[in-house]
Image: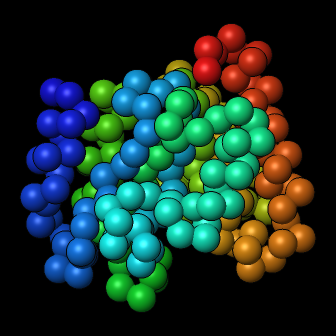
């Protein structure tokens, strides 16, 4: 199955209640065989309206971090979220919603086969790296999970709330770039 076929299937998903509130399902965007994949939390208002991940203020900051290390959703990364439909009032996606939606994400991983996965924020880091992942303590650290390198970093929305963490987050994106070069990944 191709990523486009999977997206068509996913667009009809009604496996959890989040589908009731969606304007658009936000499947993911970027290079279809990217070596680097970014996983956020879930769509916000702008993402729900446009059907694309990270297109609001957080997304603009994320794109700046990416650009600062020669990465972009148009060229060399793929971006998706833990859940594909907007949680009401931007609340955190519930564990049971993530349990259901992670099946789509697993299928995306299988097709894209990334070498590095960056968890953008606590929600995806706790789900994909470790349930007790603490962004403040463990950000920027790479761990190998079944041959895929995983790293968690600050969510851009958290940086917009507390700009003091911007420099720390930038260091994580630099560490990502160093890891890409160290592994000889072509971008
Ligand atoms: N925050 C996320 O985690 N994902 C998005 O797509 C937008 C904002």
Picture coordinates of residue 135, whole percent (x, y): 72, 60
**Quick check: 166 left or right of 38?**
right
The structure's colour scheme is rainbow
How many dots with numbers? 0
Picture coordinates of residue 175, whole percent (x, y): 80, 35
> 137 or 76, which is in the foreground?
76
Placement of the C terminus among the 4 image quadrants? top right
Q: Is residue 110 visible?
A: yes
Q: Check the image and name the residue furthest to the top.
A: 184
**Quick check: 7 left or right of 74?**
left
**Quick check: 124 left or right of 83?**
right
Q: Residue 33 is drawn in which quadrant?
A: top left
54 to 114, vertically: above or below: below
Q: Residue at x 53, y 69 (%)?
A: 56
> 119 or 185, which is in the foreground?
185
Placement of the N terminus among the 4 image quadrants? top left
Q: Residue 165 is drawn in which quadrant?
A: bottom right
Picture coordinates of residue 185, whole percent (x, y): 63, 15
28 to 97, vertically: above or below: above
34 to 118, vertically: above or below: above
Q: Residue at x 12, y 66 (%)?
A: 14
**Quick check: 35 left or right of 159?**
left
Q: Check the image and name the residue furthest to the bottom.
A: 89
Q: Residue 140 is drawn in which quadrant?
A: top right
Q: Residue at x 47, y 27 (%)?
A: 34
Q: Is residue 128 visible?
A: no
Q: Residue at x 79, y 62 (%)?
A: 136
């Amino acid at each position: 199955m191709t990523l486009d076929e999977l997206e068509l299937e996913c667009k009809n998903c009604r496996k959890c209640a989040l589908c009731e509130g969606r304007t658009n399902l936000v499947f993911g965007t970027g290079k279809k065989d990217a070596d680097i994949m970014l996983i956020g939390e879930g769509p916000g208002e702008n993402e729900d309206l446009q059907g694309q991940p990270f297109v609001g203020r957080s997304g603009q900051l994320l794109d700046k971090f990416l650009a600062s290390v020669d990465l972009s959703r148009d060229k060399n990364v793929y971006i998706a979220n833990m859940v594909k439909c907007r949680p009401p009032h931007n609340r955190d996606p519930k564990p049971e919603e993530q349990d259901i939606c992670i099946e789509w994400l697993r299928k995306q991983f299988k097709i894209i086969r990334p070498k590095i996965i960056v968890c953008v924020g606590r929600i995806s880091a706790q789900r994909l790296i470790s349930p007790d992942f603490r962004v403040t303590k463990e950000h920027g650290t790479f761990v190998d999970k079944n041959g895929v390198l995983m790293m968690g970093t600050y969510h851009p929305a958290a940086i917009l709330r507390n700009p003091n963490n911007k420099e720390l987050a930038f260091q994580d994106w630099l560490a990502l770039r160093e890891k890409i070069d160290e592994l000889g990944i072509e971008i």
